[in-house]
């Protein structure tokens, strides 16, 4: 199939609003972190509050801190929780590498947890089993991942965290918008494929004022004053103090401006994703070759699973056939316990995480992005179903 006919796995939904926002910043004379970022943080917090009110959320204030990536946000959140060498942090094995790598940045150890049977989410039962096997008090935090835009069983995870005195950092990279911030902090991603994007970027959200203050300083070299404050304060623009050896994690205003434009259309983009998921659900509902994903959430992914007993080819071969027919697909995720670094460091094996490996070995992420045409959506479903029929047992 000619490359121009290939359907991509993901595309950003951007238009004149984002273009005008970028131009506005370019013409302003201020490109780094400044008033656009402050406005983005404020509007993001208001958006979350508006969307969590129906869920009976807390009325305590949200502190939102824009950063240059969700990975940076996760690192800042863990650092603000006091995670350091000698500590252990529990994460699901079925996640992207950033969830675990930030633990290693701080010298702590990542402890992997299996997902619940037939799901993509951390299993609370496996979490508690794992905690019982660790030395008392060495585990300091848990990082549940809201896979694909669907929130984990946070009620059970929160109860376990309280029992074992664990901090909770929610990896919400897939889950904007999300109904409620349950943990000590939640981190959203604005990477190019996410439900809203700034190209690169992220947002850390917390209700803890002390954590917010620490993360605010640490995202910009540990300096006690922001660049915007120093350069707009005529009284002492040059003076600042370094309170800790921080990081370079601030986001430039040009990306924040794009984020504000995306935020204004976030509800529309979510409705588009919901419509695509509804079409796929109906198309594959009665097909014995597939298992549908759990319903609900932000639909960042549409992770359908093949039923291997119905097919004469493997999942990997199925993907190759789809790509040959011009359908862009992906896999989420290759479990971290299979990655050479973690496998060797912790002496891990597939049988230690049977449910994560089973879900991974069957999963195919189908195209789902705001702006997909009806023709494109129909084409995806048609090609996937036809391919299954070609190789049915």
Image: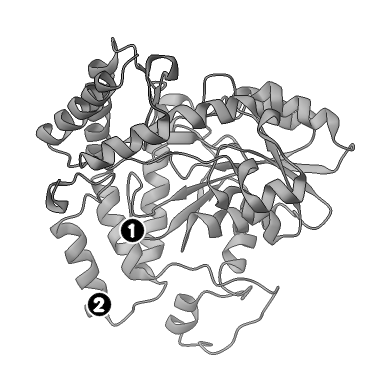
Between the C-alphas of marks 1 and 2, the distance is 15 Å
Q: Which mark identifies residue 26?
A: 2
Q: How is the image coloured?
A: one colour
| Residue 52 shows in the view | no
Task: Answer above or below: position of 284 versus 303.
Answer: above
Circle on res. 173: none
What percent of the width, then of the height, locates residue 22? 24, 68
Evaluate if marks 1 and 2 touch, with contact meaning CB atoms under 8 Å apart.
no
Position in image of residue 318 (x %, y %): 34, 32
Q: Quadrant of the C terminus?
A: top left
The residue under the point 17% across, 42% down is 371
How many numbered marks appear? 2
Between residues 389 and 80, which one lies in front from this camera angle? Answer: 389
| SS for dot 1 | loop
Residue 375, quarter of picture: top left
The residue sitting at 65% across, 61% down in the picture is 214
Side of 106 relative to 354 (left or right): right
Which residue is drawn at the image coordinates 24% and 46% (left, top)?
A: 8
Q: Earlier in the sequence, mark 1 or mark 2?
A: 2
Quadrant in the rendering for residue 18: bottom left
Indicate the secondary structure of the residue bearing disc 2: helix
Would you say residue 28 is visible in this rendering?
yes
- Where 255 sits versus 324, above or below? below
Q: Is residue 82 above or below residue 249?
A: above
Q: Nearer the viewer, residue 362 or 90?
A: 362
Q: Is residue 205 toward the left or the right of residue 343 in the image? A: left
Residues packed near mark 2 inside 10 Å, few (<14), some (14 to 19) or many (20 plus) = few
- Which residue is denoted by mark 1 in the rendering? 198
Image coordinates for residue 275, horizontal then vertical, percent: 22, 27
Left or right of 266? Residue 248 is: right
Closer to us: 113 or 61: 113
Q: What is the quadrant of the N terminus in the image?
A: top left
């Amino acid at each position: 199939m000619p490359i121009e006919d290939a359907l991509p796995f993901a595309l950003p939904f951007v238009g004149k609003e984002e273009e005008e926002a970028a131009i506005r910043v370019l013409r302003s004379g201020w490109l780094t972190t400044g008033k656009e970022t402050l406005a983005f943080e404020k509007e993001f917090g208001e958006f979350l509050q508006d969307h969590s009110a129906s869920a009976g959320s807390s009325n305590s204030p949200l502190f939102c801190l824009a950063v240059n990536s969700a990975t940076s946000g996760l690192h800042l959140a863990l650092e603000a929780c006091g995670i350091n060498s000698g500590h252990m942090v529990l994460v699901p094995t079925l996640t992207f590498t950033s969830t675990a790598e930030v633990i290693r940045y701080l010298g702590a150890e990542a402890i992997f947890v299996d997902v619940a049977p037939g799901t993509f989410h951390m299993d609370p039962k496996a979490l508690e089993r794992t905690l019982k096997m660790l030395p008392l008090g060495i585990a300091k935090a848990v990082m549940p991942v809201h896979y694909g835009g669907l929130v984990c069983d946070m009620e059970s995870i929160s109860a376990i965290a309280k029992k074992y005195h664990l901090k909770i950092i929610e990896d919400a990279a897939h889950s904007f918008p999300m109904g409620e911030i349950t943990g000590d902090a939640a981190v959203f991603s604005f990477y190019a494929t996410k439900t809203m994007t700034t190209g690169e970027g992220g947002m850390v959200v917390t209700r803890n004022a002390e954590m917010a203050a620490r993360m605010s300083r640490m995202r910009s070299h540990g300096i006690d004053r922001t660049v915007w404050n120093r350069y707009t304060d005529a009284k002492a623009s040059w003076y600042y103090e370094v309170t800790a050896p921080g990081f370079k994690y601030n986001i430039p205003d040009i990306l924040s401006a794009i984020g504000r434009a995306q935020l204004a259309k976030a509800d529309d983009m979510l409705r588009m994703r919901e419509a695509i998921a509804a079409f796929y659900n109906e198309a594959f509902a009665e097909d014995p070759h597939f298992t549908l994903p759990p319903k609900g959430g932000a639909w960042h992914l549409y992770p359908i699973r093949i039923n291997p007993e119905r097919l004469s080819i493997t999942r990997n071969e199925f993907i190759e056939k789809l790509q040959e027919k011009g359908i862009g697909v992906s896999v989420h995720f290759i479990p971290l316990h299979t990655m050479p670094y973690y496998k060797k460091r912790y002496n891990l094996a597939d049988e230690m995480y049977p449910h994560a490996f089973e879900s991974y070995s069957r999963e195919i992420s189908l195209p789902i992005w705001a702006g997909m045409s009806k023709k494109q959506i129909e084409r995806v479903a048609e090609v996937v179903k036809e391919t299954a029929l070609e190789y049915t047992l």
